[in-house]
Amino acid sequence: MTHLIVVEIEGADKVALMYAHWDKQPPLDGLWREGLGPRTPVIEGDLLYGRGVADDGYGTYAAVLAIKACQKMKLPHPKIVMVFEGCEESGKNDFEYYLNKLLKTKLQKVDYVFCLDSGGATNDRLWITTSLRGIIGINLTVKVLKDPVHSGDAGGIVPESFTICRILLDRIQNKGKMLDDLYVKIPESRLEEAKDLCQTLKGYVHQFYPLLPEVKPENEDPTELLLRRTWYPTLAITGAEGLPSIEKAGNVLRTYTTLRISIRVPPNIDAKKASAKIVEVLTKDPPYNAEVKVECTDDSNGWNATDFTPEFKAELNKIAKVRFCIILFVGYLWV
């Protein structure tokens, strides 16, 4: 199993759990440009290139530095149990195994939870995550043949498996709009936050992403873009099987196509129910009576934090101005 680090720091009566993970996204061997690689760190100007340099490696250091700052300033803090896992990005569920053991020993009583697994748009202020979309992972397989056949002989008679995948995908995402069942009413507080955030960023939203010079975002309204990445359902094809490389591709109708589909769903959606609906839509009345198999690999819920009281907002803003380094990790308590 992947490793887990548990650190205990004595303090007052209450108990705070601080969570982070240190493992990285897949190394993507062969996809780096010439001279770079996942295991070959290279510095160009102010940037360091290598696996994980922009991923979730900061959590452990941020937690330790925040606690050291409290101690240096002689500020009281609760007993702290820091838990750092090594399997989050790998897709394994080792953490659940460890957590069940910790709940019987070191985490029998927890008053606060600090989750250091978020991001910030700038480095000059406190950023707090107030919601997170859920995720549904699906493998869609369409099979039409027992054996491959020549397209010049069978094209026009035998339905093409990738074409059927496209027809099925239109059922859950048509011209950019997702299945109606995957939308929710966005809370007014989140709408206001998006507007305020857009003003803070001065409309600088899609510029964070390395789009090609001529590529435009899905919408021109910055506030709408913020809502699309936080409260709208979205779909991405993240992998495929049954497709040979271009160098090996012939004029052949293949037996099957499998697509890996990643769907983000709004925070207030029940991911299991949404997943069941998607499976139902994809498998009902398959085109040409093709063999359609849908495997759900993930159905994790998102979450939406309770609204801050005006008093807490005011206090948070006040403290952040004078003790930013301390409040940086305290803010995660309210995720």
Image (spheres, rainbow, N blue to C red):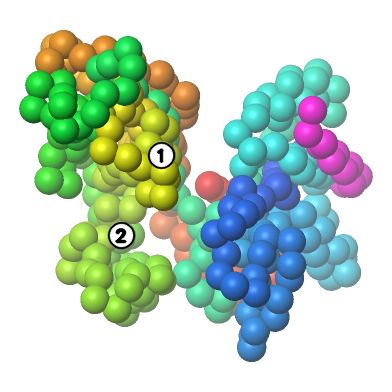
* Callout 2 secondary element: helix
* Callout 1 secondary element: loop
Left or right of residue 7: residue 302: left
Q: Residues within 10 Å of mark 2 (few under 14, many from 20)?
A: many
Location of residue 29 (image quadrant) = bottom right
Q: Is residue 328 visible?
A: no
- Residue at (52%, 65%) from the top-left corner? 120
**1 or 303, which is in the foreground?**
1
* Residue range highlighted in magenta: 1-11
Q: CA distance from mark 2 to mark 1?
A: 37 Å
Three-letter code, disc 2: Leu
From the top left corner, tell me how far across and down residue 195 is, in percent.
27, 65
The answer to if 266 sits in the magenta stretch is no
From the top left corner, tell me how far across and down residue 98 is, in percent.
77, 25
Upstream in the sequence, badge 2 or badge 1? Answer: 2
Q: Which residue is mark 2?
A: 226
- Residue at (41%, 50%) from the top-left corner? 247
On screen, residue 132 above or below 167: below
Q: Which residue is mark 1?
A: 244
From the top left corner, tell me how far across and down residue 163 is, in percent.
18, 32
Three-letter code, disc 1: Pro
Q: Which tag is nearer the camera, tag 2 or tag 1?
A: 1
From the top left corner, tell me how far across and down residue 229 is, in percent.
33, 53
On screen, residue 227 above or below 243: below
